[in-house]
Image: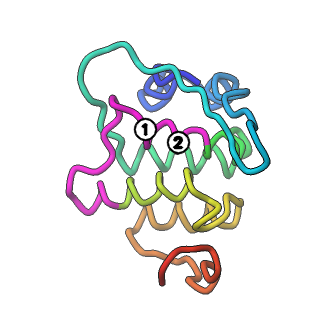
Amino acid sequence: MTEQALKDYFEGKLSASYLSNDVRGSQVRTGHDTTSVHVVPITVEGEFKVTRSHMLMLCNDAIAGHLSMEDLNTIGFALMTSDHFSLNDGSVDGEIVSETVFDWDNPGIGYGLTLENMQHWKSRLETGADTFDRNELRGKGRSL
């Protein structure tokens, strides 16, 4: 996966199918419970602020079937580890963006990457309201 493709997608220069093709093959299982993710860093200077509307683009394309759940997991990892993408600027919007990215990067300790949960993330990104069932987190290592 290339950070440039993700930035171009956010800017409306690339389709979801092109982004999905760019992401494909970035995750490689390296052990029983470990995965390696290959992300090519962006080469331009400066930060790119990821907004709720950018995250909604990803949600909508996942719900429409243009991006897979593995794509979102890879994108979540890329956003979490990037030096170029800025997620949380201290605002309520930034907190919602960073929580969503964290969830997508860590489905094993939070909510699973499913179409049903995509609807919850979409709702949270649109309204700020959390509609997840907290009971689904029991036993996943996340405090309630």
Q: Residue furthest top?
A: 43
Mark 2 neighbour class, 10 Å CA radius: few under 14, some 14 to 19, many 20 or more: many
> Is residue 79 highlighted in magenta?
yes
In the displayed structure, does residue 34 sit left or right of residue 80? Answer: right
* Horizontal arrangement in the rendering, residue 58 relative to residue 49 (left or right): right
How is the protein colored in the picture?
rainbow
Residue 41: percent from left, percent from top: 44, 21
Is disc 2 in contact with disc 1, using a CB cutoff of under 8 Å?
yes
Task: Label 2, secondary structure: give it.
Answer: helix
Which residue is at 68% across, 41% downward? 35
Residue extending farthest to the left is 90
Q: Nearer the viewer, residue 76 or 17?
A: 76
C-alpha span from label 2 to label 1 = 6 Å
The numbered disc on residue 107 is none
**Residue 99 drawn in magenta:** no
Q: Amino acid at mark 2?
A: Phe
Left/right placement of residue 84 relative to residue 123 reads: left
- First to last magenta residue range: 74-95
Assign the N terminus to one quadrant of the image: top right
Query: From what the image shows, is residue 35 above or below residue 23?
Result: below
Residue at the spot x=61%, y=44% of the render? 72
The residue lying at 61 percent from left, 33 percent from top is: 37
Q: Against 113, is 23 above or below?
A: above
Please give the label number shown on residue 77: 2
Three-letter code, disc 1? Thr
Q: Between residues 63 and 43, which one lies in front from this camera angle?
A: 43
Residue at the spot of label 1: 81
Pinpoint residue 122: horizontal percent, then vertical percent.
53, 60
